[in-house]
Image (cartoon, rainbow, N blue to C red):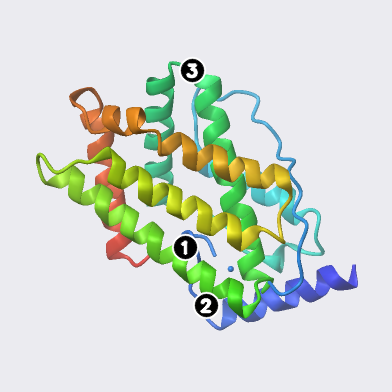
Amino acid sequence: MEGARGEGRQSRQSSENGEKPLLSFSLRKRPLLVTDHTPTPSTMESFSSKSLALQAEKKLLSKMAGRSVAHLFIDETSSEVLDELYRVSKEFTHSRPKAQRVMKDLIKVAVKVAVLHRSGCFAPGELALATRFRQKLRQGAMTALSFGEVDFTFEAAVLARLLIECRDILLQLVEHHLTPKSHDRIRHVFDHYADPDLLAALYGPDFTPHLGKICAGLRKLLDEGKL
C-alpha cells in the first residue's frame, strides 16, 4: 500500500509539471505489474471506445491507492478515430467479436502504458525508447494522412513497415513492465492493422468514408500536438 501511495504522489507531481503524454494519454523506474483483467461491456452493439477506456481505467486504478495515480481519458477526437478503426476492422473481418477484441486489446495496452508513464516507471533508456515510439507513431500518422490526401501514392508495404516498427519499439519499452499476455495484445493490435490486405481495403473505394474520418481525426490530433 505504501508503494501504491508513492505512485500516486509521483503521478500528481508529473501532472503538475505538465509532462507531455505518450499515446495521447500520458508516461516508471520500478517494474509495475499491470493486470490484464478488464470488465467486458454487456453489449457492444453501440460501440464506444471512450466507454471501454474508462472501464479499463477504473479497473486498473482500483488496484492502486487512490484515483490520483493518473487521470486517463480518451478525448473526443481520439475516440472518433478509434471508433472508425473499429468499424474498419468489423467490415474487413466480417466479425464483430474479432473487431471488438482488437479494439479492447488496443485500449487496454494504451491505458497500461499511460499508467507506467504517468507513474514514472521508465528508466532513462526506456524513456528514450518512448520518445522513439512517439516519433515513429507520428511518422506513421503523417504517412497515412499523405496516402489518404494525395491520389496514387498509397503503398501498403510502407505503412505496414511503419506499424511493425512501432510494435517492436513498444515491445522493447514494456518488456520488463507488462506481462506476456499484454505483449501478445500488442502484437495482436499492430499485426492486425499492419495486414496489407486490410490496408489495401482501407484505401480502396469501399472504405472511403471511414478513411476520410480517420484522416480528419489524425490531422486534428497532429495539429494539436497529441500525436
**Rendering quarter of residue 226:** bottom left
The disc label shown at residue 35, or none = none
SS for tag 1?
helix
Q: Of the residues shown, which amino acid type is indicated by label 2?
A: Glu
Residue 102 in the image: state x and y as whole percent.
Answer: 53, 34
Instruction: Categorize mark 1 by other alpha carbons within 10 Å: few (<14), some (14-19), many (20+).
Output: many
In the displayed structure, does residue 39 sit left or right of residue 22?
right
Tell me, yes or no, whether the two marked residues, 2 and 1, touch with CB atoms within 8 Å.
no
Residue plotted at (76% across, 62% down): 32
Between 62 and 91, the one lying in front of the other is 91
Q: CA distance from mark 3 to mark 2?
A: 39 Å
SS for tag 2?
loop
SS for tag 3?
loop
Dot placed on the residue nearer the N-terminal end, 3 or 2: 2
Residue plotted at (50% across, 20% down): 96
Q: Nearer the viewer, mark 2 or mark 1?
A: 1
Residue 99 in the image: state x and y as whole percent.
Answer: 50, 27
Q: Number of callouts in the render?
A: 3
Between 158 and 95, the one lying in front of the other is 158
The disc label shown at residue 133, or none = 1
Q: Is residue 62 above or below residue 14?
A: above
Residue 11 in the image: state x and y as whole percent.
Answer: 67, 73
Instruction: Categorize mark 3 by other alpha carbons within 10 Å: few (<14), some (14-19), many (20+).
Output: few
Residue carrying label 2 = 19
Q: Of the residues shown, which amino acid type is indicated by label 3?
A: Ser
Residue carrying label 3 = 95
Q: CA distance from mark 2 to mark 1?
A: 16 Å
Residue 121 in the image: state x and y as whole percent.
Answer: 69, 71
Residue farthest along the top direction in this orientation: 94
